[in-house]
Amino acid sequence: MNFLNLGLGELLGLLGAVSAGVVALYLLDRTKRHQIVSTMRFWIAAGSRTDLKHRKRIQQPWSLLLQLLSLALLLIAIAGPQFGVFDGPGSDHVVVLDTSAWMGAITAQGTLLDQSKANALAYLRTLPRRDRVMLVRADALATPATAFELDRGIVQNAIQQSQAGASGLNLTLALDFAQRAQSLQSARPGEIVFIGAGRVKEEEVNLRVSPTNLRVISSTAPVENVGLRKVALRRSTTAPESWDIFVVVHNYGTKTRAVDLALQYAQSPAGTRRITLGAGKEEEAAFSYKEKTGGFLEARLNVRDSFPQDDRAVVEVPSQTALRAIVYSSDPQALRSLFTTNPVMETEFRAPSAYDPAAKADLIVLDRFAPPSPPRTPAIWVEPPATGSPIPVRSVLTNVALERWSPDSTLGAGIYTRDVTLDSTEVFSPAAGDITVAVAGGGPVIVAREGAVKQLVIGFNPGRGSMKYELATPLLIANALRWMTPGTYRRWELQAGTVGSTIVPVEKSTTAAEVRVLDDSNQALPFTVENGLLRFFEGTPGTVRVQIGDRELVYSMTLPDLGDAAWKVPSRAATGIPKTSLAGSTTTDVWPWLAIAGALGLLADWILFGRTRAVRVGAGKSASLGIPWRKAS
């Protein structure tokens, strides 16, 4: 037996004090004695008070015994007695429910998560009512669904509302969270119970560090699955109009499977391949597809298995739009090789007399020509006339050596040619804020100006003289196009990957200031850049864009992140649902019955003993008032 409200010593002390008081009242008589005499003549005056006397014996022992017994029953009821086998105060348990993507696999009884929910509810029924329970949903993150609760209904509702996510299981994080919750919020830690399939990454299969109070209730339904792991696209380095496509397929099951892989681009067939995979193996299939317009690339596995969510992946492919340029020149032959051989440009040559300031173009090139009205689009000025140059011409030099470039600017990046003699060049007088790209003869010969319309002014013709054969010439034009229209040389890499943590290899010199990671709503995502690796996390399906300079990577994170193998449960961990309560049998409260018995005892004492005296006192008062009494017949 156990007392919830009072200790045994406290109960005995209180019971002794109350019993002593009741007995003292029975021994102490404060009333006057009644005596029947023939006359009051020989008695002293009634005003003198008689002395108090203690009774030498108890005249109503049965009344005293009944009162003591009733009061004892009431005090014991107040103490809150319970019968059963006890192990002190209740314990605090943490139930870690696996809600990773793998738990959505279909079995004969529903899904793996349905089986785990049933196991979790069965485990709750084995716990004593005094124990508290916290539910933690575990996938890539450990998310507490409840606090430590005594109310089983709250925990049961949280279990029923749990859904399988899209990310993989991080078992180490989930167990660490459960241990911290018990150490910070529990005075008596109970068990940490992991309920689920336990499908984890390869590095967590042999998890060595685990809690000593761990219990594992596994969902072990057989699951055979072949799914897509990744679909990647990038522009071909040999054919800019083509996409190189790579598809990775993984066999998660225990049997060798042969599957058909089919690609569609804009609902048109783009390639097929039959792949045979051994148990637990992974294969990559490569395709090449020529397409300049945008559309959706779909990869599909023609297979029926337990996990259809990873049999299809879709990637949105942007269209490749060429840069439209118009060159106004009376001698276009010198500049033709610089603009027509670039695969990202569509170049049209016009005579200066056909100049149209409203012409639809992304870039205007003015060769030794100053138009009557300034261009409305970015422009490259080649040897502009002194009277119409956007940047004043200070002087004209001949046979002058090119001294230096400005490698700190985008326009001069990667250009280091110096020992070149220019046959003729203009030297400019730049204004504050202008960018000096190259210097010759002590003055700037290439100057860039930013603003609403970007302009680049070159004091010599890069297609003539010694500069015609220098590597610096095509680099200068490429840098100019990249500076004026940043998307011209943007390198696209597209992936349909899995939800969760993503690692992107970058150059070791890359800093966080050069990187932007944006989600579907164009909001920045947190990331880290360290030792040539960029890391970010996205826990829900969606699209993430990573921008690094002129390189843009688009991740369509729609595939579920499935673990590679099943976790090997430590031998010291308890397994299965316990057959009996972890803290003994269910207790029984008896205080209501004790309280009723005590109240009935006091009522019986009043009826049997107290009522007769009250009647006698009432009868005496009635007689003194002259009220006649008659014996009942």
Image: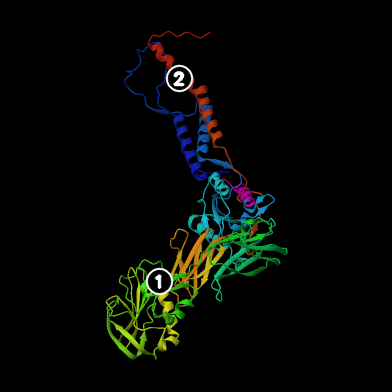
* Residue 573 sits above or below residue 370 on the image: above
Which image quadrant for residue 388? bottom left
Q: Mark 1 vs mark 2: give the one in front.
A: 1
**The one of 76 and 371 positioned closer to us in this rendering:** 371
Q: Position of residue 435 (x, y in %)?
A: 33, 78
Magenta span main SS: helix
Task: Indicate left or right for 376 with 315 as reference.
Answer: left
Instruction: Look at the image and say whether residue 500 sits in the magenta stretch.
Output: no
CA separation in Å, label 1 and label 2: 118 Å
Q: Position of residue 169 (x, y in %)?
A: 58, 61
Magenta segment, which residues? 114-131
Amino acid type at mark 2: Ala
Q: Residue at x 36, y 89 (%)?
A: 423
Sort mark 1 into few (<14), some (14-19) or many (20+) by Cα contacts within 10 Å: many
Image coloring type: rainbow
Sort mark 2 into few (<14), some (14-19) or many (20+) by Cα contacts within 10 Å: few
Q: Position of residue 382 (x, y in %)?
A: 36, 79
| Res. 422 in view | yes
From the image, tell me which residue sits under label 1: 363
* Residue 139 sits above or below residue 445 on the image: above
* Residue 491 sits above or below residue 630 on the image: below
Which image quadrant for residue 323? bottom left
| Res. 571 in view | no
Q: Provide the secondary structure element on which disc 1 rests.
A: strand
Q: Residue at x 72, y 64 (%)?
A: 258
**The one of 123 and 462 positioned closer to us in this rendering:** 462
Q: Residue at x 67, y 56 (%)?
A: 306
Task: Indicate left or right for 314 with 621 as reference.
Answer: right
Q: Position of residue 178 (x, y in %)?
A: 54, 58
Q: Earlier in the sequence, mark 1 or mark 2?
A: 1
From the image, tell me which residue sits under label 2: 614
